[in-house]
Every structure is written in structure tokens, then in C-alpha cells.
């Protein structure tokens, strides 16, 4: 995750490629439920004004993140999944009754896959990217940028050319298990 960007704009064709990759992820029932808001220039600055007011900005540990020239706001419409699974070819699943019927809410799964496509696409285009949550700013951002109330934010993706001088996340020091420890062949507990 890049947290320190140069302010150089991302080319429109690259933004279009990233958007295309966002919509190529898997979708349960081929449900059409994803939307993407692209912010550049003054709109990006407005995003930061809403999410990181001046008082907090002075203490923000990654000031270079605010230089990202493009912010992508991915949204999902959960009700689209309920509607899709109420259709005749999916009604037998019972998932068309309500969002609560979904043991695993696939709008988050499919949305996460779409976000990952953008992150991998940014790397393929030699761009940096950082995915982060909107947390308690989701409603304010929805209002600021005219996002319909039935959409839920997946987070925000900052995209641009890495500056390469920012402070790394302390999360990078966390120990993680090896691949061998995490892969279980045929049954849990077997590895390799």
C-alpha cells in the first residue's frame, strides 16, 4: 500500500483501465450492483476536507497520502443482490427474502474482489495504490458527492505515482504465518 504520492495526475486512459478492471470481478448471480466514483483535482481536495479537517490533518501520520491525484470511491448496492436472488432462477435459495437471509453477504465479497482488481491493476500500470476505510465519514461523503442512500461504501482507493519517501505503516512489523502454515491440503492440519 502506497501512502506517499507525487501530485502528478493519473492519465485518463489509466483511470479508465482501472475502472474497467473494477467491473470485471466475480459477481454472485451476475448481479449488477457496483458503482465507482472517481475524484480528481478539486473533488479530491474536497474529499480530504470532509474526512480529515485541518485540526486532524496536522497530526496525520501520512501527509503524502493527501497528494494522491486520484481517489476512487467504490460502492455496492446490497438490495440488488436480494432483488437478483428473488428472481425465478435463484428464488429457491431463499436469499431473495432479505439481506438478513445471506449467511455470507456476497456484496462485500464481490466488492472486495473488485477492489483487489483495482489494486492489482494499479501495480500493473506502475502506479501506487492504497485502500482504506471511510469509517464514520461514509454518510458525509455520500451527501457531498451525491451518492444514492441505498449504496454502501467499500472504502476509498488512492491512486497515483509513488513518491517513495513516506513513513511505512507499523502494521508491516507484524509477524505473519508462512504460506506452508496457512495452506491445508486435503484437510486442516496437513500442509505443504
Image: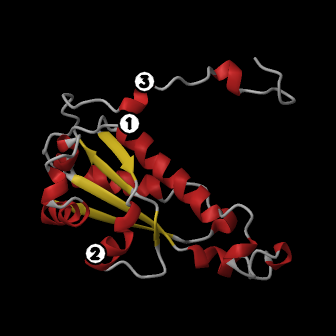
Disc 3 or 1, which lies upstream in sequence? 1
How packed mark 2 is, by other alpha carbons closer than 10 Å (few <14, some 14-19, many 20 or more), is few
Circle 3 is placed at which residue position?
A: 173
How packed mark 1 is, by other alpha carbons closer than 10 Å (few <14, some 14-19, many 20 or more), is few
Q: 60 and 29: which one is in front? A: 60
Q: Quadrant of residue 55?
A: bottom left
Is residue 151 positioned above or below 111 on the image? Answer: below
Tell me the distance, in whole angstroms, between the alpha carbons under discs 3 and 1. 26 Å
Left or right of 8: which side holds 169?
right
Circle 2 is placed at which residue position?
A: 145
Q: Please state the horizontal and vertical placement of residue 190, each as a whole percent of the image.
A: 83, 22
**Quarter the C terminus occupies:** top right
Q: Secondary structure at mark 2?
A: loop
Circle 1 is placed at which residue position?
A: 124
**Quarter the N terminus occupies:** top left
Disc 2 or 3, which lies upstream in sequence? 2
How packed mark 3 is, by other alpha carbons closer than 10 Å (few <14, some 14-19, many 20 or more), is few
Q: Quadrant of residue 106?
A: bottom right
Q: Residue at x 18, y 33 (%)?
A: 163
Disc 1 or 2, which lies upstream in sequence? 1
Tell me the distance, in whole angstroms, between the alpha carbons under discs 2 and 3. 36 Å
Is residue 26 positioned above or below 100 on the image? Answer: above
Name the front one of labels 1 and 2.
2
Left or right of 26: which side holds 136?
left
Q: Residue at x 17, y 66 (%)?
A: 46
Is residue 57 positioned above or below 164 on the image? Answer: below
Q: Secondary structure at mark 1?
A: helix
Left or right of 42: which side holds 93?
right
Tell me the distance, in whole angstroms, between the alpha carbons under discs 1 and 2. 29 Å
Q: 2 and 89: which one is in front? A: 2
Name the front one of labels 3 and 1.
3
Q: Please state the horizontal and vertical placement of residue 73, each as a whole percent of the image.
A: 36, 62
Amino acid at each position: 500500500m502506497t501512502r506517499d504520492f507525487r501530485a502528478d495526475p493519473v492519465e485518463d486512459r489509466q483511470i479508465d483501465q482501472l475502472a474497467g478492471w473494477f467491473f470485471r470481478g466475480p459477481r454472485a448471480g451476475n448481479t449488477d450492483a457496483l458503482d465507482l466514483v472517481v475524484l480528481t483535482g478539486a473533488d479530491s481536495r474536497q474529499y480530504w476536507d470532509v474526512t480529515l479537517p485541518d485540526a486532524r490533518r496536522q497530526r496525520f501520520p501520512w501527509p503524502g497520502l493527501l497528494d494522491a491525484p486520484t481517489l476512487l470511491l467504490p460502492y455496492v448496492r446490497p438490495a440488488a443482490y436480494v432483488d437478483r436472488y428473488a428472481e425465478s432462477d435463484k428464488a429457491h435459495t431463499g436469499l431473495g427474502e432479505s439481506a438478513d437471509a445471506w449467511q455470507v453477504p456476497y456484496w462485500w465479497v464481490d466488492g472486495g474482489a473488485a477492489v483487489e482488481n483495482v489494486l492489482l491493476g494499479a501495480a500493473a500500470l506502475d502506479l501506487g495504490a492504497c485502500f482504506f476505510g471511510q469509517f464514520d465519514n461514509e454518510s458525509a461523503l455520500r451527501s457531498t458527492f451525491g451518492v444514492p442512500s441505498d449504496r454502501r461504501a467499500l472504502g476509498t482507493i488512492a491512486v497515483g505515482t509513488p513518491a517513495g519517501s513516506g513513513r511505512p505503516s507499523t502494521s508491516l512489523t507484524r509477524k505473519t504465518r508462512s504460506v506452508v502454515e496457512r495452506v491445508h491440503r486435503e484437510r486442516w492440519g496437513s500442509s505443504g
